[in-house]
Image: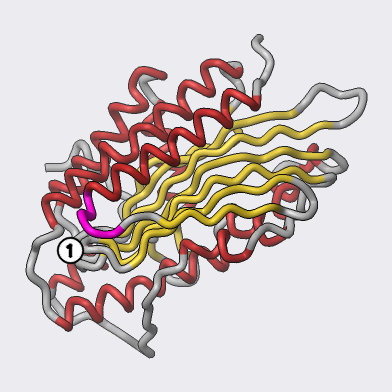
Amino acid sequence: MSLPDASVVKSYLLALQQQICDGLEVLDGKANFKADSWQREEGGGGQSRVLTQGQVFEQAGVNFSHVTGKSMPASATAHRPELAGRSFEAMGVSLVIHPKNPFVPTTHANVRFFIAHKAGHDPVWWFGGGFDLTPYYPFLEDVKQWHQSAFDICQPFGEHVYSKYKHWCDEYFFLPHRNETRGVGGIFFDDLNEAGFDKSFEFMRAVGSGFLPAYTPIVKNRAETPYNQQQRDFQLYRRGRYVEFNLVYDRGTLFGLQTGGRTESILMSMPPLVRWEYGYSPEPSSPEATLYQDYLKPRDWLNET
């Protein structure tokens, strides 16, 4: 079995960050990313790139980080108790995109690599990542196209890979206190190492490089859809769900904060504007009600008519 090579993973991730930023700037057509490099006192650092007040994107953040530490945080050892007492190296690209237009979905993606060391023991390593879509005014054809892209990425790696990681995504991006999914899902994977380093890295690259081709057609189809203030208000209300998930449940947020990461970069996923409303309930038979009734629950998107 091939040994893990963190240097080739890092090279890919840096190139991926550049590729995604370049693609999003073309889609936006107005704003550019500003780069903000940072160092972490305990070890490592990264570069955050943020686009604000664009023509299409109200805010988009694409973050690269490569950090090291002497011990794994509680959020990691609770999930993987065998990591207790090990030093670690973690690197990844994570992004969140908050469009202006309520008809363009918010989206999130990340790909990451962890390796943990302990004297006298073999390293423990794995890949993780995925992407998911959070529409406010969903279109079934967009959701099907998104999941078809995820299926096509997974298919070369096994017949049941998509269904496994689609189910994992539905379970992970779920708000128990709201009893609803964060959006319409996608794919999510973690602890990937059983196929060996080369094959696992190949899958991580397929997911990372497949994100932008999956999202671009949706943006192009919806970015010029007319909208009104009521629809904008609903978008801001639903963004509150995004905040709730990221601050309460997201592993990446917890890992970053518990390892003394850079707060600005960790919380760049937060939307620039958001609102909460006490006791909100959508009007029956409205487009807003359709989101709740038909989309915020796991569905077999590719096989439904």
Residue at position x 20%, y 36% from top?
303
Q: Quadrant of residue 139?
A: bottom left
Task: Indicate yes or no whether the magenta region holds residue 30.
Answer: yes
Q: Residue lying farthest bottom?
A: 278
The quarter of the rendered structure image containing the N terminus is: top right
> Picture quarter containing residue 85?
top right
* 233 to the left or right of 208: left
Which stretch appears magenta? 27-31
If the image is split into quadrants, where does the C terminus sit? top left
Task: Check disc 1: other Cα within 10 Å, few if <14, some if 14-19, many if 20+.
Answer: many
Identify the image's colour scheme: rainbow, by chain, secondary structure or one colour: secondary structure
Residue 260 at x, y = what percent? Answer: 73, 59
Q: Position of residue 118 (x, y in %)?
A: 87, 31
When the figure is inspected, residue 163 is found, relative to residue 107, above or below; the finding is above
Dot 1 corresponds to which residue?
103
Q: How many marks?
A: 1
Q: Is residue 1 magenta?
A: no
- Identify the residue shown where x is 28% and y is 61%: 57
Q: What amino acid is at disc 1? A: Phe
Relative side of 215 to 257, left or right: left
As rendered, which of 287 and 91 lies closer to the eye? 91
| Residue occupying image coordinates x 26% and y 67% | 292
Where is residue 126? Give x, y as percent.
63, 31
Residue farthest toward the right in the current orientation of the protein: 120
Q: Quadrant of residue 66?
A: top right
Q: Secondary structure at mark 1?
A: loop
- Residue 25 lies, in percent from the top left, at 28, 50
- Give the main secondary structure, helix, strand or loop, of the magenta stretch: loop
Write the residue at 51% across / 34% down.
13
Nearest the viewer among 71 and 268 is 268
